Every structure is written in C-alpha cells, then in structure tokens.
Image (tube, helix red, strand yellow):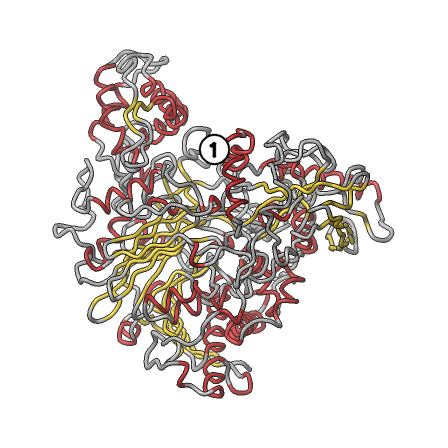
Amino acid sequence: MKLLPKPFRNGNKGVVKAAGVALASSFLIAGCLYSSGSSASEGAVSDRAVSKSAMKKRLSPPNDKYKAIIRRTTNGVPHIKAANLASAAFGHGYAQAQDNVCVLAEAIVKARSERAKYFGPGPDTQFGVGLNIVNDFSYKAQKIHSGAEAEFAALTNESRALTEGFTEGYNRYVTETEPSDLPEECRDQEWVKVITPADLLAYYRVVGQYASGALFATGAVFLAVPPGQSPAPRAVGPVSNAEAVDKLLENVVATARAGAKSDTNFSGTGLASNAWGIGKSMTEQGRGALLANPHFPYTGHRRLYEVQMTVPGYLNVHGAGLLGTAIPLINFNANLAWSHTNTASRQFTWYELVLKDGDNLAYVKDGVEKPITTETYQIDVSVDGMAEPLVLERTFYFSEYGPMIAANALSNQLPAWSDNGALNSSAPVAHTYRDANPDTGGLLETWLQMSRASNLDEFQSIFKNCGSTLWTNTVYADDQGNAFYIDSSSVPNLSQEAQALVNLRRAVSPAYAGLFDQGVTLLDGSWSQEDWIETECGPLVPYEQKPKLVRSDWVQNSNSSHWATNPDDFLTGFSPLFGDEEAPINARTRLGLKMLQNPMDPGFADAPLPAGQDGKFSAEELVGVIWNNRAWYAEQFLPELLERCDAIGNTAVNGVDLSSWCAPLGSWDGLYNRDSVGAHIFRVFMANYLGDMSTDLTTPFNPAAPVATPADPSRDNAGTADDTMLLALADGVTVLQSQSILPTDALGDLQYHRPSGGVVPGSDGIPYFQTQPIPWHGGDERVDGAFNAIGVAPDEFAEDTRFPRIAPTIIPNTAGLSDGTDGVDGWLVAQGTSWLFGLEFTKKGPEAYGLVSYSQSTDAMSPFFSDQSERYSNKAYRQLVFTEKDIQANLLPQGKTVITQE
C-alpha cells in the first residue's frame, strides 16, 4: 500500500535532532512531581513545615509494622484509616483481597507471563488454541515484568509506600486464608500466592498500556520476524511427544494470526465514560459539582473498587479505582473532585524503518546505519499428558523505538517485513512502535498528589510537573466553583513539522487517512524529523500544549475529542494526536451538551428536568441526569419515524406489517427505563438505520452547530414501502419476531444483568449463572445514543482474564440481542455504567450520592456480590459517606476490623 511519497526534505533543513530516541523511560519522572502543597485531609499542614523524620512517619510505619483500621459501611464499602500511607495501602490491599482475591491473583499471573504455566497453552477460542502462549511471550517482549523489576528501585518514597503496603495487605489475606476457603474460581490453586511489589508494579504496566502495547499483545508483536523465519517458539530440551508439540506450536502461530487480524480499531481502550464539571454559576450551592459516570466492564481486571483512605493530617480521599490500584482513581476529598473519561488522543505511534540493502536486521536513519536488536525469552507451558512443564523459547526483535511489529498481520494493505514500504514505496521496510506509557512508576504518585490537592492551582501543578493519567481526560470541580477540563493523557510530542506531515498525509492519501482513523499514526523512521521531541517531562506533550479549559459554568467530556468541551469556548489548534477538531461528536456527547445547554428541558419525553425547576444542579439531580435514561437518537428521530408509521398504516414493508409494532412506539416515552415499552423496537430500528445515516441525512455536519448536526432524514419515499427508515424498522422487527419477542414487552423483561462464572481458569469446568436475572435500565451508547450507557459483552471470558463466563451468541444489527443459544436470550448486559456518582460541594463539605453498579465483590458467596446491582436496578443510590459522623452512622454490624502485620 502506497500511503504517500517521501516528503521533500530540502536537504537537512528543518530536521529535528531528537535528544534520546531510545524506548522512552518513565514519563512520570519522580523528581518532577511536587509533594509540597497543602493536604485536603483533616488537620492538614503544609509539607514544608514538616521535618524529614515526620514526613517519613507519614509514609511508613516504625519498624515496618503495618496497622490499619477497616470500617465497612453500607454495601461493604471499606473506609481505611491508618497512621501512615503504607499502612493505609496495607488495609486497602487486604480489603480488596477479601472481596476480589481470585481476580487480583489472575492479574498477577498475567503480568508475570505465567498464564501458560498455570492455565495451559490457551483456551480453544475464536482465535484457536495457544493464546496464553502468545500473550505470555508478548508481555515478555514488552518488558512488563522485567521492566517493573528494573523500575522499582527508582520509585518515589510515596509510590514505594503505596506499592509495598498494598502488596503486604494482599499477602496478609492470602497467607491467613486456607486455600480451600478461597472462592471457587481459585480454590486450592497454587497460583494464588504471595506477591512482590514488583509483581504489582508489573500489573500497573499492563494497565498503563491498555490503549497502546496491550493492543498488540494478541499477535502483532509475536508475529514480527524477518522473512524466512518462523514465529513459532522452540521447545527447549527433549520432549516426550514431539509430534503433539509441533502441532501445538503450529496452532499457536495460527492463533496469533487470527488474534492480530481481529484487531481493527486501535483508537483507545474500548472503554467509555461521561463526566461533567459544574461551576458555581450552575449549582444550587454556588460552589462546584461533579457528575462521574465511567462505563467499564462488569467483570475482570477493569472493575472499579470503591474505598475511602484516610491518613490524618496527610490524606483523606473517597473514590474508586481499578482492581489492584493502591489508591482510588476517580475521587473526591474535602475540597475538590474529579472523574476521568477515555481520551480520543493516541498513546503510541508506529514507525516505518527503511532497511539496509541486503540486511533485514539493520535500518538506516538520517543516513546512519542502526541495528535491529534481539532478545530471547522462555516461558513454561502446562500441557495435558506431560509430567513436567514444556519450556518454550522465542527470539524477539527491537528497534530504538521499541518492539518490532508485524504490520501486515494487522492489515493486508500494509507491507510485510522487507517488502517495499507504505511511506517509502521504493525501499524494503520493517515496522516498529513506540509506547507513550511503557513505564508506570509514577501512576500512584500522580493520583496520590491529585488526592492531596486542595485547590485548582495545586491540582493543575501536578500536570505542569509531568503528571499523566495515562489514557484518560480529567474533568474537575471544586468548592470554589471552578470547573476544569484537561486531556491529561500521555501523548507523543511531535514537532510542528511532523504534525504537518501527518495532516498532509491524511489529506492526500485515503489509505493513510483510513489507517489513521483506525487509530494508527504511521511515521517515517528513516529520518529524525518525525521522532518524538524531548521536554523536561520526557518525549510527551507538555502541559502548556495540552487541551484544557477552566469555566464557571461547566465543562464535560463523553469520549469525543477535546474540541467541543464547551461549545461557547471551542478548543482548537492542538496536535492531531489529541483527536479531531471541528468534526462530528458522538451521540452521548450531543445529548450531554443538550442537557447542559438546556438544563430545564426534559426533551420530548416526560422525564425529569436535568437541573430541576431552578435550572441549577444539585448532587442528586446529577445522579438523575444519568438515570433519566434519555437517548439522543430517540429525541432526534422518533417523531419522524412515527409520522412515517402513520403514513404506511397496514401496508407491508419488506413483507412485514409494522402496525402492531408502531403502536407501542407511539406511546413510548422515549426513555430506556425498565418499564419502558417500545424501547426495544426503537433499538433494533436504530441498529439497522445507523448504516444508512451517512447517506440518508440531508443536513450535513456543521462545526458551528455540533449538537444539532448532522440531522434530518431524507423525505424521499417517506411513508412508503421503500422508505429507508421503515425498511430499517422492518429489518429490526423481523429479528424480534424470530426470537418471539412481543411489541408490548417492557425493556426490563428483555434486558438484564446476570453474572456467571464459578470456574477455575484452564479447567474443564462449565460456567453457570450466579444470580437470577436482574432487570437493567439504560441503553446502548452507540445504537441508542444513551447517556446511561450499558452494553452486551460477547466474549467467553471475563474482561482481560481467563475466567470462563456464559457469553451470548449475538444477532448482528441488534445492539447485542442474544439468539437463544444455550438458553441465553434478550440483552445480557455485562458492561457500561459502573462507578457513578453526583457530588456537590456545600458549606459543610462534599455531598455525594451514587453506587457501584456491579457491587464490590466478585465472590458469589459474598454479601457484597450483587447487593448494589439490585440498587442499580431499582435506582436506589446511596450516600457516599465521607465524614467520621457519617461513617459511624452507616457502619455495618461487626463492620470494624483492625489488621496488623504479624
């Protein structure tokens, strides 16, 4: 594929000589992060007034003897109190292990490249057999664990305290719990064992690369070998059944190819979120308010866990973080609050290297020859019928930027190693990538400092001093009435010349534009002009060049780019790697902006006013904004569809009489509540009409009106059997009829959450449902355009894990409707709205309400396994308790535990 000829270079003029283009060291340089501002915790004093010895006591206990008080309130939320940071993390690690030990243990197995050792070569999935082998080797090549071991010594004292404390808390629970007493997913399993701080840090490196390196761990890195070489690993030493091993290794390569081909979108993590920061002019109390609404998987490593951590005089924060993180990530303290949304920015770039003539292991850059280096790794594989683990070995290849990548394995349009290039069409090339988040030693440091900040200046200074939130935006509000947005992710820092080249290639090459739209930024590695530019914070875009906005009314993000954070103040002129500007925004963003711009308009439905009768938001009204279950496409298209339904009457459309299906649509309130009748019909209509919108809408996108456009379905054939909208409705109705779904069914009878599992990874166990169906409200973010976004997950394993679950077989163009296989019908929800809350600052401090939709624990025997799921189903949010008085008032019976290190 020829993407674009090599640009005119005018000799060496304008070529940037990057300082240090080796694989990036940690972007969160410990020395950059401040640790001085005042704390937002009880009795806080400035760090400047504290001696080194006193500060040490705040971080670590005397004689390394940890002690923490764990108090559990409503729904099992732990409130950890300790005299120092390490002990608070100790209590946090213990509480998380109590609730989620199996998932945490499996995450460490993954980070240590030991899935094949404990779970076998890999499940027989859509990719084939051997995925565990592919993953284990890929994580070795990405230096997940070896890099963590090397990085650990450079951690700040704060990060070390958090990492070591959490590790010790987890280990305390594991060592005191009989293996036979563990949940059935990991009962009596040898892989549930004590871990090291480096193990935990390795897991953070996996998390940090969700939007970058992890995308290439299913096959693209594994398959990157020079021509004439096989990517198959080699068995080390004699094997008892050589024929079976050869067949296994053949399957491993096929699995890697299938895994790589399955990746068609590299533009993020696959996650979503809504977040609003409301300023003083739009709140009832005249202070700030926050809506936090991440849309995360309900299973696996990306579950969020709620906790409050308190170290008197140093830290007091309440929030939720990904399982395994030693401090919560979406939080509030006494003075400020924030949430994160998945960014539209990019956390990696590909490089096309021009190979030296006749040498596939050398490339030429700026006329200088550079080597492609190699490293060889080994992994253990448990194979049925073999008494000892099979030891496999593979050699991987690296450029100065990072691992080599098999670009042709991801797209048939891209060249293989040593073929003529896409950018360099007359030279043999190879491809590699550079990761903006290779190291995550500063992960905990960043969120610790955010949690300790007490005002906007302190909060902003974290990002000025090199802090990063990896792959997310940050939306913030405080008690002074400030609303603040920043794309705080790690974004490669390209020169103005390199940015111009990217934009030029996109403009003149449809092939390059298509690749870019898939999330791949392909750069020319044959000259230093396109290297990342070093700053005081490494090779990432510095604070001054990041999109950001402070307002007194509101800021928001729902995963569209930074551009339309607030249409009264568009953000433009940033690197193309931050996302498109003056481009269409997604349906959730359009609906969110509509509610913010019209806070006293319920839409056409009989829904609550977003901000009530006074047009100003309170904490509970912000929860209501999520749970009002409005959807953009219903508000945009339902009236038009009903008009056409009336016109067609009983006349068949594509063989379907729509009259009995149009009738419920006519009385539907346009919302996605449990008792809504007609929502399911509109959903399957939209699932089919989405493919027609680009050609059927007559009013094109207008950058001056990003909420209102594109719009207006074509009137051609309107109300006839050839009506595009009615044909889409007929296609959807046909599917509903095939599943014996009635036009009068309520959404809650068809859409439900029902966790499943109970099986040890790598075993022959069969997963089973662990609760009765729990009716679920909300809509699909893409198909329904719902703000309270939920969705179906067709994967047969819990997210990021090897825990089997019951997966639906879904029907195309239905937003995930099951086809009835294995008794699974309707919409089986397994992702979406997760940790949600509305918060407002008052004279008495933060007032917040919300919950964790899938509950705190993954242990089916825990009282905290589905209790909050029932709350979500019934729209019964709870207070997020913060003060000592409220903690005591909501303390569960026998809810207090004191743990010490023995």
Quadrant (top left, top right, bottom left, bottom right) of the N terminus: top right
612 up-or-down from 669: above or below? below
Residue 229 position by quadrant: top right
Q: Residue 506 at x, y = what percent?
A: 51, 34
81 up-or-down from 593: above or below? below
Q: Residue furthest left?
A: 613
Q: Residue 213 at x, y = what percent?
A: 59, 50
874 up-or-down from 582: above or below? below
Residue 512 position by quadrant: top right
Identified at 42% across, 76% down, the residue is 36
Q: Is residue 692 left or right of residue 126?
A: left
Identified at 33% across, 41% down, the residue is 588
Q: Residue 343 at x, y = what percent?
A: 44, 49
Quadrant (top left, top right, bottom left, bottom right) of the C terminus: bottom right
Secondary structure beneath label 1: loop
Identified at 35% across, 82% down, the residue is 45
624 up-or-down from 152: above or below? above
Q: Nearer the viewer, residue 520 or 863?
A: 520
Residue that carries the numbered disc 1 in the rendered image = 810
Residue 185 in view here: no
Residue 115 position by quadrant: bottom right
Residue 407 in view here: yes
